[in-house]
Amino acid sequence: MGGIALFGGRGETQAAMDQAQTMAMLSPQQVVFLEDAETIEKMGEKNREEAVASLDAYLGNPAPFTVLVVEATSLDQRMKLGKLLAEKTLVVECGLARTRASGKPLQWRWRGRLGKNKA
């Protein structure tokens, strides 16, 4: 499976959506990572709206050969991007559990929920 990482903070949202719609050359499937997606919320209004519209259009008709991973440290659920992802995607929150007083090592924890997919 092929993969590519692009960054929301560098204005690469459209490039990520274009790549997600383009079939990989040497693999029947691909993974496209859109990293630092929280930076989309900090863009100017025009650029932010374009990025969210691009992502919304892709999610309305996703490519069957692509797994799109949108990574963000946190998203404001009141903003369009957070609402869009909560509505149309599987959201998985990941983080490290805090060290306990017992001195046990850090462990990974995750919590996921399925958004309302329109299939």
Image (tube, rainbow, N blue to C red):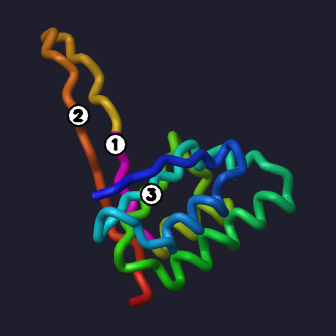
**Residue 29: % across, % down:** 31, 67
What kind of element bears circle 1? strand
Q: CA distance from mark 1 to mark 2?
A: 8 Å
Please give the residue where the numbered disc 2 appears in the rendered image.
108
| Quarter-of-image position of residue 84 | bottom right
Label 3, residues with CA under 10 Å away: few <14, some 14-19, many ≥20: many
Query: Which circle marks residue 13 in the picture?
Result: none
Q: Main secondary structure of the magenta part?
A: strand
Q: In the drawing, what numbered circle is on residue 32?
A: 3
Residue at x 61%, y 75% (from the top left corner):
56
Neighbour tally class for label 1: few under 14, some 14-19, many 20 plus, Cα within 10 Å: few
In this figure, which residue is indicated by the disc labeled 1? 94
Which residues are drawn in magenta? Answer: 89-94
Look at the image and say whether residue 21 sits in the magenta stretch.
no
Amino acid carrying label 3: it is: Val
Which residue type does callout 2 highlight?
Trp
Closer to us: 11 or 88: 11
What is the CA distance from the residue labelled 2 to the residue labelled 3?
23 Å
Report the mark closest to the observer, 3 or 1: 3
Residues 55 and 79: in front is 55
Query: Is label 2 in a helix, a strand or a loop?
Result: strand
